[in-house]
């Protein structure tokens, strides 16, 4: 019997990003014939493509072979010290390509994959890797695919997944490994992203930042035993003139980089997506330290949103992205998507006369929590939930003394935004915090940073 080692990648990987060089230029990209011949000498399935260079035609073969090229050609620092925590051990840091071809000799594209699955291999069953079409489009990068290929190759060393019993991926078959120190396939995923973020040469800063966040999302979500990561957390403020600041609980500010525009920031794990107030600017990943932009859309919903008219866009009030659920908040209704394996959506209308204003996170943003609080324009708090995969809306027990535009918990402090100013919230009381950017704060969120990636 063949046992399938399916890799559940869910939101974190299904939303890839593209090679920065590709993003910045539309010059024809070609793989020279010499490289094609070297690749075809191992992957004989590509022999008929090795009679000349292969150029980007957006075909499945192009995406596969350019990902193999990424593994062959990406250079890393000569010295790659391991992290003090469990993010990077370096145990998979030597030649990725040699590791891969030591295990995989055939790549087969399959068409019938369940939602969320990008690739798989069979245990005890040869040296083929099966790739789902989703992984072979411009929504994935070579960097993502290289990480997936390394992950799949590791399965052939005898490392299957388990069903998570807790955490963000609770209940999902094949979505966890027991612990990162075992060095299984999810450890490979974390190691490859961490290595790219910290030690790859010639990587665009925005890709590096994305890779960093991806490493931490997998480390946080794909293991039964929590992965030890040395990290700190701060409140991040975005001003009306699109400047990022970190803000301490005492109100000390430090200016960081700029955003493409001011707007609403939605968290997806460690990633941030901005929905600009200027509806002619597209929603996209945003980075706080002037890392630049990534051309591709964070997900299908954002792609749909970006295709809408400004009036249609203005109807979306807020968005919550959990690990296995999401809530799209419109002025008069909420759309809940409660099952990551199904496209089913549930629309629930707000109570008569109520207009949605903002989601708030007085307990902090958490991917494994299934309820989020929504404030209405009149100041009522409503619980939106996908608990037990059932969509619901009900009055919240949350009580606030002011009609906040945003609330986040960062580094233990609950901070609210109102009228461009910050308040420290303690239950149903609040105290104003003085900052150098008072009156100019448009949005707040929480942001973590990690010892290993700090310069
Ligand atoms: Zn896997």
Image (cartoon, rainbow, N blue to C red):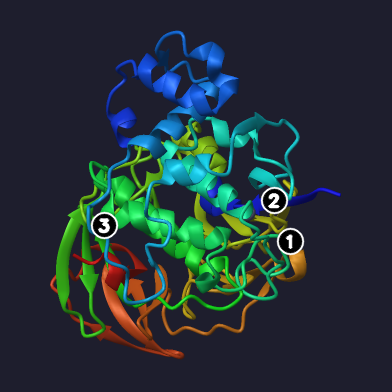
Local secondary structure at mark 1: loop
Give me the residue at 28% from left, 76% from top. 422
Toward the viewer: 445 or 87? 87
Pointer 2 with pointer 1, Cβ within 8 A: yes
Mark on residue 6? Answer: 2
Q: Is residue 184 left or right of residue 345?
A: left
Toward the viewer: 75 or 448? 75
- For label 3, count other residues whose C-alpha is less than 10 Å away and answer few (under 14), some (14-19) or many (20+): many
C-alpha span from label 1 to label 3: 35 Å
**Is the residue 311 above or below the residue 273 in the image?**
above
N-term mark: 1 or 3: 1
Mark 1 = which residue?
173
Ligand 1 resides in the quarter of the picture at bottom right
Mark 3 = which residue?
288
Nearer to us of marks 3 and 2 is 2
- For label 1, count other residues whose C-alpha is less than 10 Å away and answer few (under 14), some (14-19) or many (20+): some
Mark yes or no: residue 16 visible. no
């Amino acid at each position: 019997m063949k046992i399938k080692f399916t890799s559940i990648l869910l939101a974190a990987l299904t939303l890839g990003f593209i090679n920065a060089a590709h993003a910045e230029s539309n010059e024809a990209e070609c793989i020279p014939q010499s490289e094609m011949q070297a690749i075809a000498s191992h992957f004989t399935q590509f022999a008929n493509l090795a009679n000349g260079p292969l150029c980007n035609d957006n075909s499945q073969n192009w995406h596969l072979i350019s990902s193999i090229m990424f593994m062959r050609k990406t250079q890393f620092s000569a010295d790659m010290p391991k992290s003090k925590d469990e993010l990077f051990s370096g145990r998979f840091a030597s030649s990725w390509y040699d590791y891969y071809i030591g295990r995989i000799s055939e790549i087969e594209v399959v068409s019938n994959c369940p939602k969320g699955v990008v690739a798989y291999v069979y245990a005890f069953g040869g040296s083929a890797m099966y790739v789902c079409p989703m992984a072979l489009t411009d929504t994935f990068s070579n960097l993502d695919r290289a990480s997936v290929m390394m992950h799949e190759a590791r399965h052939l060393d005898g490392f299957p997944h388990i069903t998570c019993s807790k955490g963000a991926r609770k209940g999902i078959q094949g979505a966890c490994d027991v612990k990162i120190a075992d060095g299984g396939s999810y450890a490979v995923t974390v190691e490859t992203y961490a290595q790219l973020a910290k030690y790859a040469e010639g990587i665009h800063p925005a890709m590096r930042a994305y890779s960093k966040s991806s490493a931490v999302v997998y480390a946080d979500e794909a293991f039964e035993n929590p992965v030890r990561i040395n990290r700190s957390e701060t409140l991040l403020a975005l001003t009306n003139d699109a400047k990022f600041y970190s803000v301490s609980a005492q109100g000390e500010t430090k200016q960081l980089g700029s955003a493409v525009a001011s707007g609403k920031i939605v968290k997806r794990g460690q990633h941030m997506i901005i929905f600009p107030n200027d509806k002619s600017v597209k929603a996209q990943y945003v980075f706080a330290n002037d890392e630049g932009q990534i051309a591709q859309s964070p997900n299908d919903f954002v792609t749909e949103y970006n295709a809408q008219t400004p009036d249609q866009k203005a109807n979306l009030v807020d968005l919550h992205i959990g690990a296995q659920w999401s809530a799209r908040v419109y002025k008069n209704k909420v759309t809940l998507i409660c099952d990551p394996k199904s496209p089913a959506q549930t629309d629930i209308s707000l109570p008569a006369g109520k207009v949605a204003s903002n989601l708030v996170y007085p307990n902090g943003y958490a991917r494994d929590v299934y309820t989020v609080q929504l404030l209405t324009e009149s100041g009522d708090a409503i619980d939106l939930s996908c608990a037990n995969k059932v969509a619901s809306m009900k009055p919240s027990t949350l009580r606030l003394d002011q009609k906040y535009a945003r609330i986040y918990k960062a580094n233990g402090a609950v901070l609210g935004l109102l009228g461009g100013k910050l308040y420290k919230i303690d239950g149903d009381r609040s105290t104003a915090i003085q900052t150098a950017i008072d009156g100019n704060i448009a949005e707040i969120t929480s942001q973590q940073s990690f010892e290993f990636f700090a310069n």
